[in-house]
Amino acid sequence: MEEERTERAPRVVAGVSGSPGSLTALHRAAAEARRSGAELWAVLAWAPPGGELGHRGPSAPAVLAECRRVAGERLLLTLGGAFGRTVPGVRLAGVVVRGTPGAALVGIADRPDDLLVLGAGSRGRLRRALRPSAARYCLAHARCPVLAVPPSPLQHDLNAMHRRITWRAPVDLRELTDRGTP
């Protein structure tokens, strides 16, 4: 009996959350997919508020369905924000998965010829302690190559501006506009 073989298109799997780092990674993933002729899979992972144990009552199915619907809308908004009315130039699939981001991404990018692309923003000790890094999880557990994309160069400036506004420090907008002039 001959085993049936099917050709599967190579995939570039990108983790998206709507954060600036994930948008940078999504654009890089689209470029990698165009370069290699692969499909682009944009994956948004979601978990129920309060975790899995909090949703075992009789109203749980309705709450979970609403959470999944909201996650789907968030994915569409993220893709719209990333690409606007233009198309990324590759075959694009949006995937919404229930679970933690790292495990969900590793579960989807399960072929050796996949490429997993995610944002690897800078994180301080406090953030690492409170919220584990999906990038670290993927680097440790993935069965395919992982491309960790550093934040956009503008992200540092945006974070600095946000800190100044939070601490009510004076903000001079010329600092942002004068960057390219000598």
Image (tube, helix red, strand yellow):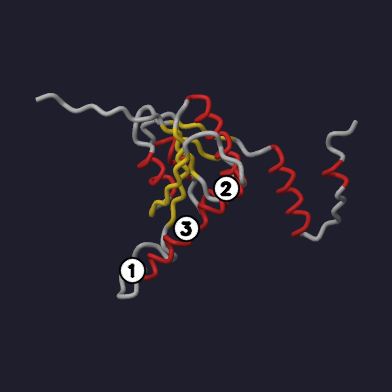
Q: In the image, which is nearer the foreground, mark 2 or mark 1?
A: 1
Asked which secondary structure carries label 1, the reply is: helix
Q: Which residue is mark 2?
A: 125
Viewer-closest of 104 and 37: 37
Describe residue 121's horizontal placement relative to residue 179 as left or right: left
Which quarter of the figure has residue 141?
Answer: top left
Mark sitting earlier along the chain (2/1): 1
Q: CA distance from mark 3 to mark 1?
A: 15 Å
Q: Tell me where residue 148 appears, x and y as whole percent.
A: 53, 34
Q: In the image, which is nearer the foreground, mark 2 or mark 3?
A: 3
Q: Residues within 10 Å of mark 2 (few under 14, many from 20)?
A: few
Asked which secondary structure carries label 2, the reply is: helix
User: Considering the image in quadrants, where does the C terminus appear?
Assistant: top right
Describe residue 19's horizontal placement relative to residue 103 as left or right: right
Q: Residue at x 77, y 58 (%)?
A: 165
The reply to whether the C-beta atoms of the residues labelled 2 and 3 are less than 8 Å apart is no
Q: Amino acid at mark 3?
A: Ala
- Relative to 142, say whether 55 is above or below: below
Q: Which residue is mark 3?
A: 71
Numbered mark located on residue 61 in the image? 1
Q: Amino acid at mark 1?
A: Pro
Asked which secondary structure carries label 3, the reply is: helix
Q: Amino acid at mark 2?
A: Arg
Residue found at the very far left of the displayed protein: 1
